[in-house]
Image (tube, rainbow, N blue to C red):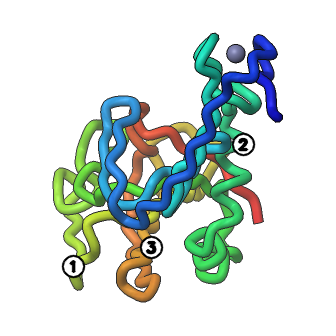
Amino acid sequence: MMSCDLCNSIRVLEIDSKASDCHGWVYMGRDGDGYAPHVPNVCGGDYVHLLVCLDCGKVQGKFPVVSEDLAESAEDSDATKHFWDNYGNVEGESYYLGRLNPMHITDAMGRNVVGGGSGHLLSPPCSKEVECFFIDLHPDANWGHGCLYVLIDPGNNMRVYELKDSWPPHHSIEGVKITK
Ligand SMILES: [Zn+2]
């Protein structure tokens, strides 16, 4: 029988749920519905997998979840593989920004990267949520400078949208650096 990794209680509840694209979530002021974000010890894609101690409340597993952990789960995904297939030769630093509603992707100036202040419109239209990547084309230079937002639409045969911009993502979007 397993026991809590903090208080040793054996009153640990394990929950396994599969909801495919029917998850709802909120994180740092953003929300989404569809697939669950990839977070070690908690959830990812179709699944929620949680072990919770009913005595001390500790969620089992290693915390804090740091950005390297998030990057590791991001690097395993089909979307990331597709990203590298298309952008592996581009010089710069690449980041995974998460599965986001494209209308919620804002840059450091608070402008919508898609359709808003920066003047981009997606054509053809994409799904309600896409996998979002960011490439800093000149990581050693001060902002603003050339950068790319790359949206990959798993609901649409991995269609790739590329948006040129000159500012990094807004601070409310937690990007994790990924390497090939
Ligand atoms: Zn406990």
What distance separates the C-alpha of mark 1 from that of mark 3? 12 Å
| Residue nearest the viewer, comparing 143 with 168 | 168
Residue at mark 1: 125
Give the residue drawn at x 64%, y 19%.
Answer: 58
If the image is split into quadrants, where does the N terminus sit?
A: top right
Beta carbon of the mark 2 residue lies under 8 A of ligand 1: no
- Tell me where residue 32 appears, x and y as whole percent: 31, 49
Identify residue for label 2: 69
Which residue does the image show at 45% across and 53% down from the upper left?
36
Which residue is identified by label 3? 152
Disc ID at residue 37: none
* Residue sitting at the far bottom: 157
Query: Would you say residue 117 is visible in this rendering?
Result: yes
At which x and y percent is residue 120?
Answer: 23, 66
Q: Nearer the viewer, residue 137 or 35?
A: 35
Asked whether, in this view, residue 117 is left or right of residue 138, the answer is left
Q: Is residue 97 left or right of residue 31?
A: right
Give the answer, above or below, for where 61 lies relative to 32.
above
CA distance for labels 2 and 3: 22 Å
Q: Judge the density around disc 3: few (<14), some (14-19), many (≥20) Cα neighbours within 10 Å.
A: many
List x then y, in percent, for residue 160: 43, 79
Count of residue discs:
3
The image quarter containing residue 83 is bottom right
| Amino acid type indicated by mark 1 | Pro
Q: Residues within 10 Å of mark 2 (few under 14, many from 20)?
A: some
Query: Of the residues shown, which amino acid type is indicated by label 3?
Result: Ile
Q: Between tags 2 and 3, which lies in front?
A: 2
Going from N to C along the chain, the mark reached first, 1 or 3, is 1
Q: Nearer the viewer, residue 146 or 163?
A: 163
Ranked by sequence position, the earlier of labels 1 and 2 is 2
Label 1 to label 2: alpha-carbon separation: 32 Å
